[in-house]
Image: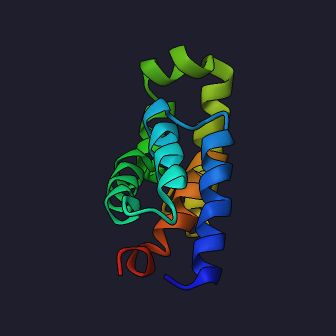
């Protein structure tokens, strides 16, 4: 993997693990991948990391559906859920495919480099 790509993904993995919106599973995968960089475990951890990111990234339609649900209102609070749904509809109209929270933004940035990571 090119050093420039590796440095970029390391930066985004650190952003991911430090994001308040990051799931425990994604954080653990990021930490394990970061620890494996430069070792004989890097390739295996890269595959696990990518799989976790693909599982955790929230499609914008999923965010809208969740924010508009009773579960979304319970998690965010009714007013915030309405704002989250409105924001998600707005970013979708502008072409977003995924949630733009810090964790999802980091996931998306890393997944854009997926083919280069899996070489």
- Percent from the top left, x then y, of residue 45? 37, 55
23 shown above or below 95: above
In-image side of 55 versus 85 (left or right): left
Q: How is the image coloured?
A: rainbow
- Percent from the top left, x then y, of residue 10? 62, 62
Q: Is residue 96 visible?
A: no
In-image side of 13 versus 111 (left or right): right
- Front residue of this view, candidates 114 and 96: 114
35 shown above or below 64: below
Residue at 37% across, 58% down: 41
- Percent from the top left, x then y, of residue 50? 38, 59
Residue at 32% across, 61% down: 47
Residue at 67% across, 40% down: 19
- Front residue of this view, candidates 52 and 10: 10
Q: How many marks?
A: 0
Residue at 60% across, 28% down: 81
Q: Among all residues in the image, which is located at the extreme front?
A: 40
- Front residue of this view, candidates 33 and 59: 33
In-image side of 86 versus 70 (left or right): right
Q: Among all residues in the image, which is located at the extreme bottom?
A: 2
Q: Is residue 73 visible?
A: yes
Quadrant holding the C terminus: bottom left
């Amino acid at each position: 993997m090119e050093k420039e790509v590796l440095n970029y993904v390391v930066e985004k993995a650190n952003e991911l693990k430090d994001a308040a919106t990051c799931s425990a599973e994604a954080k653990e995968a990021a930490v394990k991948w970061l620890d494996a960089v430069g070792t004989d475990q890097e390739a295996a951890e890269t595959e696990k990391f990518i799989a976790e990111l693909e599982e955790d990234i929230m499609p914008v339609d999923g965010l809208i559906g969740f924010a508009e649900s009773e579960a979304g209102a319970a998690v965010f609070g009714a007013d915030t859920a309405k704002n989250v749904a409105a924001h998600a509809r707005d970013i979708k109209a502008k072409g977003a495919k995924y949630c733009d929270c810090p964790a999802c933004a980091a996931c998306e940035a890393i997944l854009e480099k997926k083919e280069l990571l899996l070489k």
